[in-house]
C-alpha cells in the first residue's frame, strides 16, 4: 500500500507503549512516540495520531506547537496500537511560535528518552481526565493493552486501552479513577490495587 501524506500542527507528543497483561503480571513494549496532529492526512482535514520510532523522535525533537509533515500508513491491527497511523517517514518539521501561557501542568516540552519513562514508572490515570486535561502533557500515555486471559492457552487474548500518568505525584490535575481489573482463566479476576501504583512510582519525590 502506498504511504499517505500528512501535515499539520503537533498537539501532543507522548510515549508510545504497549502494555502486556497476564493476570497480575505486566510487561511493557516501548515502541516509540505518538504524535497527535491537527491538519490533513490523505487529503482529509481532521485531528489524527501518528506513531514514530524512537530514532525519529531523537532526530526531530518534536514538541507541542511544531509544524510536521511526512508520510505514514494506517495501523494494520488497531487493537495493538493507540495511534491510527504509523511507520512515519520523510519527516520534516519546523518549530511553531506557540508559547505555553500557563502551567505546567500540562508539561509540553520535548519528551525525554523512553528509558526515562521506564525508570520513572506510571500510575493509572482515569480516561476522562486524560481526555479532558492530559492529552497535551508529555507525561500522559494512552496504551494499547493485550491481555493473555489464560497462560495455558496463550492464543486467548483480550484487548483494550488504558491511560497512565508518568508525571509528578503532586500534579493537581491527577485523578486515579477506579482500580483496574484483569480477566483470568475460569472466570477469575485480578484487581490491581493502589499499592501497585505506589510501588511503581516510589522512587520519585512529590515534585519530581
Ligand atoms: S495528571 Fe499526569 S499526565 Fe495529566 S497533566 Fe498531570 S502530570 Fe500530566
Image (cartoon, grey):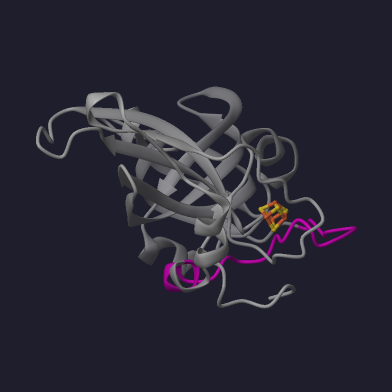
Q: Is residue 106 magenta?
A: yes
Q: How many labels were placed on the picture?
A: 0
Magenta segment, prevailing SS (helix, strand or loop) = loop
Q: Nearer the viewer, residue 207 or 114?
A: 207
**Residue 30, position as x, y percentages in the image:** 35, 58
- Image point (28%, 33%), residue name: 184
**Residue 99, position as x, y percentages in the image:** 82, 60
**Residue 169, position as x, y percentages in the image:** 70, 65
Q: Locate residue 163: give its quadrant.
A: top right
- In the rendered structure, the answer to whether residue 200 lies left or right of residue 65 reads left
- Image point (45%, 26%), residue name: 42
Report ligand 1 position as a quadrant: bottom right
Q: Specify the segment rendered in magenta.
A: 97-117
Q: Locate residue 159: give its quadrant.
A: top left
- Image point (68%, 76%), residue name: 208
Q: Is residue 157 visible?
A: yes
Q: Residue furthest left?
A: 152
- In the rendered structure, the answer to whether residue 195 lies left or right of residue 132 reads left
Amino acid at each position: 500500500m502506498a504511504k499517505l501524506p500528512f501535515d499539520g500542527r503537533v498537539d501532543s507528543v507522548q510515549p508510545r507503549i504497549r502494555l502486556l497483561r497476564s493476570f497480575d503480571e505486566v510487561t511493557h513494549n516501548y515502541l516509540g512516540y505518538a504524535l497527535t496532529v491537527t491538519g490533513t492526512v490523505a487529503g482529509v482535514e481532521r485531528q489524527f495520531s501518528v506513531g514514530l520510532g524512537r530514532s525519529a523522535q531523537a532526530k526531530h525533537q518534536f514538541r507541542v506547537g511544531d509544524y510536521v509533515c511526512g508520510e505514514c500508513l494506517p495501523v494494520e491491527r488497531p487493537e495493538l496500537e493507540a495511534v491510527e497511523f504509523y511507520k512515519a517517514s520523510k519527516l520534516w518539521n519546523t518549530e511553531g511560535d506557540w508559547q505555553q501561557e500557563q502551567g505546567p501542568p500540562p508539561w509540553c516540552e520535548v519528551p525525554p528518552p523512553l528509558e526515562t519513562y521506564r525508570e520513572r514508572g506510571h500510575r493509572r490515570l482515569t480516561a476522562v481526565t486524560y481526555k479532558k486535561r492530559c492529552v497535551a502533557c508529555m507525561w500522559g500515555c494512552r496504551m494499547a493493552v493485550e491481555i493473555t486471559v489464560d497462560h495455558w492457552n496463550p492464543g486467548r487474548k483480550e484487548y483494550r486501552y488504558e491511560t497512565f500518568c508518568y508525571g509528578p505525584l503532586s500534579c493537581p490535575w491527577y485523578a486515579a479513577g477506579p482500580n483496574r481489573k484483569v480477566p483470568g482463566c475460569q472466570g477469575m479476576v485480578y484487581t490491581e490495587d493502589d499499592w501497585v501504583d505506589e510501588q511503581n512510582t516510589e522512587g520519585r519525590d512529590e515534585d519530581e
